[in-house]
Amino acid sequence: MAQADDLTLDELRLRLAPLVAEAAIFDGWSDAALAHASEAAGTDPALAPLAFPGGAIDMIEAWVASVDAKMEAAFDREVLAQMPIRERIRALVWFRLEAVFGLEEALRRALAIQAMPQNLVRAARLGWASADRMWRLAGDTATDYNHYTKRAILAGVYAATLAAFVDDQSEGKAETRLFLDRRIEGVMKFEKAKAKWLAKREHFDPIRFLGRLRYPAR
């Protein structure tokens, strides 16, 4: 592993992000948390702030990116391909939750910062990007409007599940597991309904329909 001071700023950002998250439990997403992370990583304390010029939201984005990287490294696409689609999505979302077990307070503070008006657009982009990575790992190759609806829906499911996760005091986050299962079941029902609607639409003949309007059956 390269020495921290030999890393590029992008590499340093990913190296420091999980350590900043640990410090954020007590210090929030602050300069103090970054200083503690820099000390833990053994890097020059004057160098670390250069990796996060945007402050707290940059630190949070890097934390999300570090979870994205762990997820992509942990899953074999061929193994995922053997699983039902709902199990693929469930496994990917749950992996991300397990990656932040014990960091609920840091996550709570991160969500509060993301909810600030000046950060809403950036937070939405982060959620979209994570949903996109999950769908791509799950083998999705859609390029039409399904590409966008799938990601928008999963981003919403993931955001809601994170909110449930933060306040879940049940053993092993059992309540969050049930919450996630219900949300995924809802997505699957929606996808089935959408597929049926599209199938009907494909067989729809506008010329015949207009003819019926003009010459109604007797």
Image (cartoon, rainbow, N blue to C red):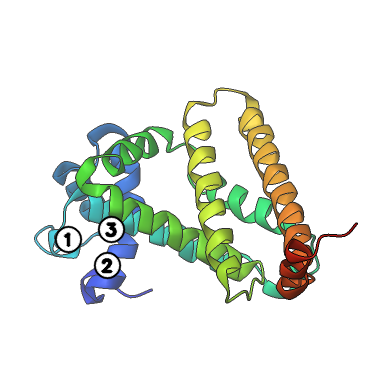
Whole-percent x and y of residue 122?
Answer: 29, 55
Mark 1 lies on a secondary structure that is helix
Whole-percent x and y of residue 106?
Answer: 35, 38
**Distance from Cα at disc 2 to Cα at disc 3:** 9 Å
Amino acid at the residue labelled 1:
Ala
Q: Is residue 129 above or below residue 180?
A: below
Q: Quadrant of residue 45?
A: bottom left
Amino acid at the residue labelled 2:
Leu
User: Are the two marked residues, 1 and 2, in contact with CB atoms closer than 8 angstroms?
Assistant: yes
Q: Does the rendering let one see residue 106?
A: yes
Looking at the image, which residue sits at the far left? 46
Q: Does the rendering let one see residue 172?
A: no
Within 10 Å of disc 1 (Cα), the crowding (few <14, some 14-19, many 20+) is many
Within 10 Å of disc 3 (Cα), the crowding (few <14, some 14-19, many 20+) is some
Residue visible at 56% across and 68% down? Answer: 145
Mark 3 lies on a secondary structure that is helix
**Which image quarter holds the N terminus?**
bottom left
In the image, 164 versus 121, the foreground residue is 121
User: Are the two marked residues, 1 and 3, in contact with CB atoms closer than 8 angstroms?
Assistant: yes
Mark whose residue sits in front, 1 or 3: 1
Amino acid at the residue labelled 3:
Ala
- Which residue, given by chain and number where applicable, does mark 1 sit on? 48
- Which residue, given by chain and number where applicable, does mark 2 sit on? 12
